[in-house]
Image (cartoon, rainbow, N blue to C red):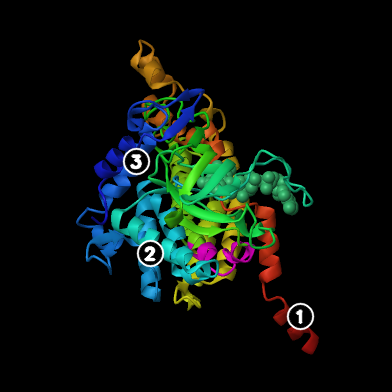
């Protein structure tokens, strides 16, 4: 089969009829027609279609070593620096098509799966079958171009270091039994972006902070199941696409991915989909000994660079539209984005240039440069929004809708809301775009996403501190 088209993606997701809840109601009928999901499903479909564009297919796909079909580049196991570059170009291509606003474009999870499969031997430490299951699942996803959501986090009940859940009924999803069919999971997990609109959900232990002990811990598990597995429920949050109109909701109407709480109601995970069960040694090594962090951040920085370029473009156009770009403080503010953009490009190229083969034979970008980037971006991104708010000022609030422009007030609005370079309609269209980036609920969720999607920034920074080879510098100073 190989790389799918947008229509094939949509048909599969519609056919699946996963249990998705939103605002107290179960989604019935075609999810691709539901107002909360139709925008994102259409956008995602357009990404899959790009794989078949004559000018893009050499970047977005490669020849499968198994079948000879063309499959998605995000599944490519990189063995050379050229492979790494190809992966970056493919991520950039999809990010450009979505302005870097889709955190979970399919390449993110395809990349994650590739890194785990490349280290499948690690999963064999539990049992050979587990490693084999993972490899087989990776090949299945690559050949069928399966879309994935994921949940790696436990519910936010009590984050004290000494908390240990000992309730009789699970809150955080755990293995409640095993039988001939598989492991049975009950409880909840957070937070599946695009939950319910992907073919599969990948479930792994909680980040690099896994603290279990022993070989039979019910919290140590890794598996993937179809999104419509019996007993699996996605509770989607309130949608942030206020209106379907692209004028009124320029970004939310197309890029609102939604995020879902995941409930496992005695879900049976078949044995051939179990990659880990009970073994804390393996769970604790999953993120340390695979290249998940490296390659997920490599994909992420490629996307964030595109997003920064987009924000820079919006900001500069807004400044020119109301003629404020000659003021020194405006130049200084916009230059903050230029510096951030060049810094992110520096991190990316440094990580690629210093890439090395890891013990699994994966060409792996340099973690110090990647860690610096994942530390840096969540700290500058809020500033981007602040600058945009400062440049737009009241223009980000005086925003009539498309219906206002179509009403008998249209002529007045065209005149009174004109700018130095455009009429009222075009000016409001641009300012609505800026508003959806920096003030709307969609824009706020983007901020929260950039802060947290890869884990708690505080602990990520602590990890950078702990792992950075500072001792070399200390010795150097001591010897002077
Ligand atoms: C928009 C969005 C989309 C997301 N999408 C996904 C997804 O698709 N899949 C997925 O699995 N996850 C997803 N996440 C979840 C993300 O991985 C978590 O938000 C992240 O790991 C932080 O965990 P938490 O939200 O539970 O915060 P918490 O860990 O509860 O932290 C809350 C606060 O307490 C502090 N804190 C907590 N514990 C400690 C500690 N031990 N030491 C110091 N400080 C501490 C933190 O610094 C933070 O300030 C998403 C999150 C967001 C916001």
Residue 418: image location, x then y, percent: 41, 26
Q: In this view, does 287 lie to the left or right of 426?
A: right
Q: Who comes first in sequence, dot 2 or dot 1? A: 2
State the residue at coordinates (37%, 62%): 136
Residue 87's disc number: 2
- The percent position of residue 348, horizontal first and vertical second, equals 49, 65
Few, some or many residues within 10 Å of mark 1 (<14, 14–19, 20+): few
Does residue 186 appear in the picture of this structure? yes
The chief SS type of the magenta part is helix
Residue appearing at x 64%, y 42% in the figure: 155
> Marks 1/3: CA distance?
51 Å
How many numbered circles are shown? 3
Quadrant that contains the C terminus: bottom right
Please state which of residues 255 and 167 is positioned toward the viewer in this rendering: 167
Q: Which of marks 1 and 3 is in front?
A: 3
Query: Is residue 12 located in the magenta-colored stretch of the structure?
Result: no
Q: Measured along the vertical axis of the image, is residue 468 above or below residue 187?
A: below
Instruction: Report how far apart the C-alphas of labels 2 and 3 lie in the structure.
Output: 21 Å
Give the residue at the far top of this rendering: 408
Q: Which of marks 2 and 1 is in front?
A: 2
**Residue bounds of the magenta highlight:** 280-295
Marker disc for residue 61: none
Read off the residue under disc 3: 43
Q: Which disc is residue 474 wearing?
A: 1
Q: Toward which corner of the image does residue 208 lie, by quadrant?
A: bottom right
Q: Position of residue 104 (x, y in %)?
A: 45, 48
First along the sequence among labels 2 and 3: 3
Q: What element carries label 3?
A: helix
Q: Is mark 3 within 8 Å of ligand 1?
A: no
Mark 2 is surrounded, within 10 Å at the Cα level, by few (under 14), some (14 to 19) or many (20 or more) other residues, namely many
């Amino acid at each position: 089969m190989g790389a799918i088209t947008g229509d094939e993606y949509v048909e599969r997701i519609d056919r699946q009829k996963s249990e998705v809840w939103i605002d107290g109601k179960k989604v019935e009928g075609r999810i691709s027609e539901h107002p909360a999901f139709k925008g994102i499903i259409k956008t995602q479909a357009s990404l899959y279609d790009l794989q078949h564009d004559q000018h893009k297919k050499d970047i977005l796909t490669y020849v499968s070593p198994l079948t000879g079909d063309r499959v998605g580049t995000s599944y490519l196991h990189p063995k050379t620096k050229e492979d790494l570059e190809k992966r970056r170009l493919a991520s950039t291509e999809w990010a450009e098509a979505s302005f870097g606003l889709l955190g979970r474009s399919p390449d993110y999870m395809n990349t994650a799966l590739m890194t785990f499969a490349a280290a499948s031997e690690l999963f064999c430490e539990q049992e050979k079958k587990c490693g084999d299951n993972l490899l087989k699942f990776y090949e299945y996803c690559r050949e069928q171009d399966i879309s994935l959501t994921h949940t790696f986090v436990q519910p936010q009940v009590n984050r004290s270091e000494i908390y240990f859940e000992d309730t009789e009924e699970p809150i955080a999803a755990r293995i409640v039994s095993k039988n001939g069919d598989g492991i049975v999971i009950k409880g909840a997990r957070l937070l599946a972006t695009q939950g319910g609109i992907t073919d599969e959900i990948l479930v792994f232990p909680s980040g690099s902070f896994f603290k279990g002990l022993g070989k039979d811990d019910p919290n140590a598990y890794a598996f993937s199941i179809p999104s419509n597995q019996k007993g699996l429920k996605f509770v989607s949050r309130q949608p942030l696409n206020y209106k379907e109109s692209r004028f009124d909701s320029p970004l939310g109407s197309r890029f609102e991915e939604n995020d879902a709480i995941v409930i496992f109601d005695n879900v049976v995970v078949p044995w051939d989909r179990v990659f880990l069960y009970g073994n804390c040694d393996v769970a604790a090594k999953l993120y340390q000994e695979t290249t998940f962090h490296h390659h997920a951040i490599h994909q992420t920085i490629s996307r964030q660079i595109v997003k920064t370029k987009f924000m820079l473009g919006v900001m500069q156009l807004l400044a020119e539209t109301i003629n404020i770009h000659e003021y020194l403080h405006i130049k200084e503010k916009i230059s903050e984005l230029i510096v951030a953009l060049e810094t992110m490009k520096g991190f990316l190229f440094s990580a690629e240039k210093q890439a090395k083969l890891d013990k699994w034979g994966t060409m792996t970008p340099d973690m110090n440069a990647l860690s610096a980037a994942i530390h840096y971006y969540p700290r500058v991104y809020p500033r981007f929004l602040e600058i945009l708010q400062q440049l737009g000022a009241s223009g980000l609030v005086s925003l009539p809708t498309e219906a206002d422009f179509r009403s008998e007030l249209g002529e007045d609005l065209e005149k009174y809301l004109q700018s130095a370079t455009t009429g009222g309609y075009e000016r409001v269209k641009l300012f609505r775009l800026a508003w959806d980036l920096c003030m709307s609920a969609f824009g706020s969720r983007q901020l929260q996403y950039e802060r947290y999607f890869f884990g708690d920034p505080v602990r990520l920074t602590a990890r950078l501190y702990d792992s950075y080879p500072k001792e070399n510098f200390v010795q150097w100073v001591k010897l002077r």
